[in-house]
Amino acid sequence: MLHRQVHRWTFLVTWSLLAAWAGQGPMVFAQGTKEAKAAKSANSPQEALGVYSDAANFQNNNAFDLAAEEWEKFLQKFPQDPLATKAQHYLGVCNLQLKQLDKAAAAFAAVVKNHPNFELIQDAYLNLGWCQYSLGGQKVEGAYAQAAATFAEMVKKFPAGKHTEQALFYAGEAEYNLGKKKEAVAAYDQLIKKYPQSALRSDALYALGVTHEELGQHADAGQAYDLFLKEFASHELANEVQMRKAETVLQAGDFAAAEKMFGDVAKLAGLASVDHALYRQAFCLSKLDKFAEAAALYVRIPTEFAQSPYVADAAMSAGRCYYRTEQFPEAAQWFQKVVDGSSNGRIEAAHWLCRIYLRDKKPQQAINLAKQVLPKAGDDPFAVNLQMDQADAWYESADSRPEAVAAYLKIATGHPQHELAAQALYNAAFGALELGQYDEALKHTADFLKAYPGHRLAPDVQYVSAECHLQRGEHPQAEKLYAKLAESATDHPDRETWQVRRGLAIYLQKKYGDAVAALEPTVAELKNADNQAQAQFVLGVSHFYLDQFDGAVQALQAAMKANPKWKQADEAMLFLARALRKQDKTPEAISTLSQLITDFPNSRLLDQAHYRCGEFSYAAGDYKTAIAEYDAVVAADAKSPFAPYALYGKGWAQLKNKAYPEAIESFNALVASHPEHALVADTHLALGMSLRQAGKLDDAVKEIDLYLASAESKWQRLSGLTCPSRASTFISRGRLPSV
């Protein structure tokens, strides 16, 4: 052991179990208990017994907060009751369980002060001293002094009491923490002499030696250490005592000095435990974050002391140190030696080796290693870790993610008490989310929150639930979950992400004003670039649909500034161009679209970008550019939903340029390639105009007839009436509008 050992435990003295039941009559104590008999003989009023019973039952069922409330109620209403002393004591016990040490101390202090003949007075003293000592550990001013005084008074009043040896030991500890080391020595020494069979004897001897050393009383320290080694030769602290001076310095936190001392000890001629000294020296170096130097010493042990009991631990520690210095090949080498050996550390070494493989993006090697070692893992403490590594490796292999999810579930269900069980269940839920298995993911999240309601990962699990609802289009549920997350987990590093996702859920419900209200107060505080970009994007689009184009432009520009390469940057640029166009800033809109096309050549929005660029150019009277952009739509994706609109716009741009044959060709291409499209009727009209301008009146009449027939059909469908007009009438009268 590497630091001064101070055993600490909570002194919760035995108290009688009380029970009550509710029947037709009044609440009564369970029959046969000591406490029940005492209560009945106390001649307490029935109401007092009822409160006492409730408090006792709550306490028996570990509902210490409720019990404390009832004990306080009892003391307030029945301060003179014969059971009040016990109530006061049990109030202290409950507050001690609740870690409300100040309240517990006050309760025990009241018992000690006012009821010196109380049957549990020694327990009250011990608990009072313990509370005060613990408060001292919390840096409460004067608490150690109070503890020392309480324990001293206890020893004085009960020199042969049932808790006197504990009182002596912690009196010494309290004095030690007060810096009164001579007084501490006296307490330790009294315990050692008076209680030779005490379970605290080894700790007292050790503490006595350390305290003597800190006082500079090295001879006395040597006597204490000698006695320790005589009586506790096989004790876990024996080697530590042998290296007492170095260990003392180490326990003071001076790792640099301790490292030198261990180094000097290791060089002593004839030292039988050189390997131990080297091992401890390496430890000091690691505590100083000198992992490379520590690794060099750890390596010496298996190299120079092949029979040392520290060989396997040293090899493992060498691997860990190399791992910390990111010397992964060296770390892998030593972990592999442990894997190839026969020590109990094989499974842990395989675990770390798998982590290296995963870091190096070699999931298959991790899978193979886990497959090789796991059958021999048995109940090794790191067996589950290795199973987790294997699942992680499957997860990193895109084709094996279903296997990963299954493996995570196996860990969670097969080892529900393991520290990784919760992590595994979360991973299963998240993996199912990524696989689009939203029902399964929601089941896993529900199982998690039922099994681990207070776990640190609970907020992350709730995020998975919210995201499942969002992806399933259940936007109101997602909104509520994200709002709850943001309100409850205020310190979570992903809180700002949840706030943004909540805004997105609101936006997807087309509650654009609410989305703006949700995001605008927090958007300036977002630190993550992607979150900033998404929040500004949602704000910008919401403003756009609210016809608030100034706000839309501002927010969308902010989104682009936050992260120009954000995954939806192309969409942000598209909306920015549309908003600029709404502001009559057509050149800026066209420039934005051109940038989109240049920066995102593989964008799924490329066809729309070209189309809108064509539309904006057409509106600006730049028909040549418009034609080129319309052509680009079809070139980008002939099956694009914008393709027929591009052909239509192209035809009109050619018509405007008086390129009638080309316009005729474009309109004909639209009709031929998209015969069922809603634009076909209007295309017949435009085609008729083009043919008329080209002097092909007969063909023009046919196209206009087709248009009118379509219009008539539509009219009939809408009103049941007939449109009598004929195209030839319009043409003969010259009523067709000129281009």
Image (tube, helix red, strand yellow):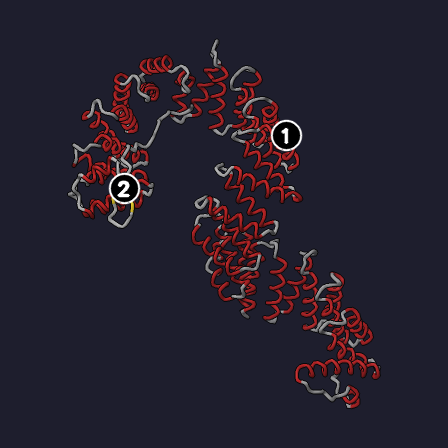
Question: Foreground residue, 413 or 586?
Answer: 413
- Residue in the picture at 49% in, 60% down: 519
Mark number for residue 372? 1
Amino acid carrying label 2: it is: Ala
**Amino acid under disc 1:** Gln
Q: Quadrant of the N terminus?
A: top left
Task: Give how far across and how far down residue 25 sits, in percent.
Answer: 25, 49
Q: Is residue 739 shown to the viewer in this render? A: no
Percent x, y for residue 172?
28, 25
Placement of 498 over or under 399, stated as above or below: below
Q: Position of residue 656 (x, y in %)?
A: 75, 76
571 or 307, nearer to the observer = 307
Q: Which quadrant would residue 142 be assigned to in this image?
A: top left
Mark 1 falls on what kind of element? helix
Real-space Cα separation, disc 2 to disc 1, in angstroms: 56 Å
Number of other residues with Cα within 10 Å of mark 2, as a class: few under 14, some 14 to 19, many 20 or more: many
Q: Which residue is mark 2?
A: 56
Which mark is nearer the camera, 2 or 1?
2
Q: Position of residue 240 (x, y in %)?
A: 41, 19
SS for dot 2: helix
Where the C terminus falls, by quadrant? bottom right
In the depicted view, which residue is nearer to us: 616 or 96?
A: 96
Q: Identify the image quadrant of residue 374.
A: top right
Q: Can the viewer see residue 506 in this picture?
A: yes
Q: Residue at x 26, y 22 (%)?
A: 187
33 sits to left or right of 242: left
Q: How many marks?
A: 2
The residue at the point 38 percent across, 16 percent down is: 232
In the image, residue 704 sits, relative to residue 535, either above or below, namely: below
Vertical side of 159 occupied by 427: above or below: below
